[in-house]
């Protein structure tokens, strides 16, 4: 990193946030242009497909530019902020306005109203760029940067309008990288796409992106543009010869204007992708059973009456699950389709479904098999609170080996759960309600619950799945059965 005395402007790019994430959405800026920031001070809050993350900047100095409005989705490696190291708060706006006007119209005279947010001039070409370990979540190392998992394409110049794209980067209006560039006819330059997902989607369907008109800022091609083009091509291909003769050269019919379109991104998009993959790759089956949970409820009441921290019902169900998985380890596994192997896992990392304002998330309780009911209760409470506050880390949302889904909290009796890929099974628990039940040969009102197990039929047959579910039901009906495993 450059020393304060160097006076360089350094560009901080969206770092690799780990866990295979390739993009993030800007939720809230934590700094303004002209603010002085310290090393590792959070400058922006972003939402990935897994969690909300505050991104710290590895440079200390004056913020001279921000890239992207709140709600904008950026790929890993895209610029976030430019920081003038060795500058002062007073010269921050001057740096920001010294390379272009605030409105992008152009003479390079600057606009001190604060709407410009243009980046400062970079270091002289002769100077060597500082070396470091590359963009990381917190801080910078001291050695040369390792190879990135995903490389950013080198910049190429594109002639655009004054408030548009320059040097192959997308800028918001008033955030151009330099003086305004006069409008020009399209040239054979780079395609206006910044999302690697959009490029991959087009490549998979042999779609030439140069033929599309982007609907994003300054003609940026979005995923919705590619999907619309694919639908239009499919509709065009399905026409009869007579229809083709009568409508030669006609444009595809516009999509219906009524209704509201909600982008599948962030948590909702991640859930959609994972569930679709689960249905596509896993040959699942479901079995279910009703169980009398009266004794389990009484046992919990007795535990909580004995003093100490209260024990939650989901913790007791989790303890039952780990005991059942010890007896039926086939269900605590995953399938490696390329090697054609079933990988049985040593420890139980128990995921549980949690509904939040951002959608359904599945936090993971690490080493659940080694925890007692009290420890499980505390960890469920901690992860649930973090989920509702949006503070879960990517590491707390990945690595599960089995999932417990208590959808009974929504007043639902039963369901056919979808396996949380790449796991092999999920146990669903419905609501516990009073129902007529034959108990000890007599009809009585008992607390009844429906248990559903969805399992990957590749890892076991119905006998194993049924044995697992029956053992769970036996523990629910007679909690003393668990004493054999304690």
Image (cartoon, rainbow, N blue to C red):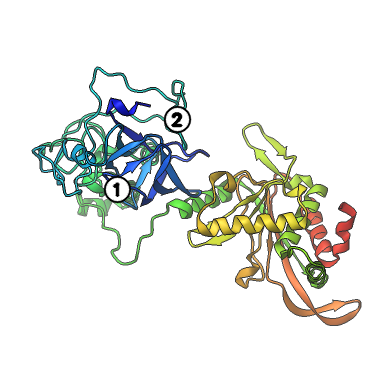
* Disc 1 crowd, CA 10 A, few/some/many (<14, 14-19, 20+): some
Asked where in the image residue 480 lies, by quadrant, the reply is bottom right
Question: How far across and how far down the image is residue 157, in percent?
Answer: 21, 30
Total tally of numbered discs in the picture:
2
Q: Which residue is mark 2?
A: 140
At x 32%, y 51%, the residue is 228
* Disc 2 crowd, CA 10 A, few/some/many (<14, 14-19, 20+): some
Give the number of the disc on residue 153. none
The answer to whether residue 213 is seen in the rendering is: no
As drawn, is 148 to the left or to the right of 325? left
At x 83%, y 62%, the residue is 475
Question: How far across and how far down the image is residue 3, in percent?
Answer: 34, 26
At x 72%, y 59%, the residue is 315
Asked where in the image residue 82 lies, by quadrant, the reply is top left
Q: Which residue is mark 1?
A: 32
> Of 119 and 369, which appears nearest the observer?
119
As drawn, is 143 to the left or to the right of 342? left
Question: How far across and how far down the image is residue 474, in percent?
Answer: 84, 63
Element under disc 1: loop
As drawn, is 306 to the left or to the right of 112? right
Image quadrant holding the N terminus, namely top left
Question: How far across and how far down the image is residue 311, in percent?
Answer: 74, 63
Element under disc 2: loop
Q: Can you say whether 174 is above or below 444 in the image?
A: above
Q: CA distance from mark 2 to mark 1?
A: 23 Å
> Of 9 and 146, which appears nearest the observer?
9
The answer to whether residue 262 is seen in the rendering is: yes
Going from N to C along the chain, the mark reached first, 2 or 1, is: 1
């Amino acid at each position: 990193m450059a020393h304060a005395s160097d006076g360089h402007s350094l560009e901080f790019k969206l770092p690799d946030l780990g866990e295979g994430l390739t993009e993030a959405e800007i939720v809230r800026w934590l700094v303004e242009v002209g603010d002085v920031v310290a090393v590792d001070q959070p400058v922006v809050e972003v939402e990935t497909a897994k969690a909300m993350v505050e991104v710290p900047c590895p440079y200390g100095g004056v913020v001279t530019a921000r890239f992207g409005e709140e709600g904008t989705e950026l790929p890993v490696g895209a610029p976030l902020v430019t920081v003038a190291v060795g500058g002062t708060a007073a010269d921050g706006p001057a740096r920001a306005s010294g390379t272009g006007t605030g409105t992008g119209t152009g003479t390079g005279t600057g606009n001190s109203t604060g709407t410009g947010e243009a980046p400062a001039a970079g270091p002289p070409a002769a100077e060597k760029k500082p070396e470091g370990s590359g963009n990381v979540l917190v801080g910078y190392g001291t050695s040369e940067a390792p190879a990135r998992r995903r490389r950013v394409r080198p910049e190429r110049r594109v002639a655009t309008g004054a408030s548009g794209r320059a040097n192959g980067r997308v800028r918001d209006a008033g955030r151009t990288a330099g003086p305004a560039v006069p409008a020009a006819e399209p040239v054979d330059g780079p395609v206006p796409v910044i999302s690697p997902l959009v490029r991959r989607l087009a490549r998979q369907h042999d779609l030439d992106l140069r033929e599309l008109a982007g609907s994003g800022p300054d003609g940026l091609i979005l995923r919705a543009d590619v999907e619309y083009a694919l639908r239009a091509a499919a509709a065009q291909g399905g026409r009869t010869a007579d229809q083709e003769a009568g409508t030669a050269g006609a444009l595809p019919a516009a999509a219906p204007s009524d209704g509201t379109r909600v982008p599948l991104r962030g948590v909702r998009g991640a859930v959609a992708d994972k569930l679709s993959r689960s249905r596509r790759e896993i040959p699942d089956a479901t079995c279910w059973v009703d169980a009398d949970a009266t004794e389990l409820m009484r046992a919990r009441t007795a535990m909580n009456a004995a003093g100490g921290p209260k024990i939650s019902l989901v913790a007791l169900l989790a303890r039952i699950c780990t005991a059942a998985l010890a007896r039926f380890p086939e269900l605590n596994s995953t399938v490696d389709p390329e090697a054609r192997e079933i990988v049985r896992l040593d420890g139980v990392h128990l995921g549980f479904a949690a509904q939040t304002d951002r959608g359904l998330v599945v936090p993971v309780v690490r080493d659940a098999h080694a925890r007692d009911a009290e420890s499980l209760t505390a960890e469920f409470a901690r992860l649930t609170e973090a989920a509702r506050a949006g503070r879960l880390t990517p590491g707390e949302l990945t690595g599960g080996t089995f999932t417990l889904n208590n959808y009974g909290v929504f007043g639902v009796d039963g369901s056919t759960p979808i396996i949380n890929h790449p796991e092999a099974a999920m146990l669903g628990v419905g609501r516990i309600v009073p129902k007529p039940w034959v108990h000890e040969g007599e009809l009585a009102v008992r607390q009844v619950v429906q248990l559903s197990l969805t399992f990957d039929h590749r890892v076991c047959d119905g006998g194993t799945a049924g044995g697992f579910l029956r053992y769970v039901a036996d523990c629910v009906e007679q909690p003393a059965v668990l004493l054999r495993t304690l």
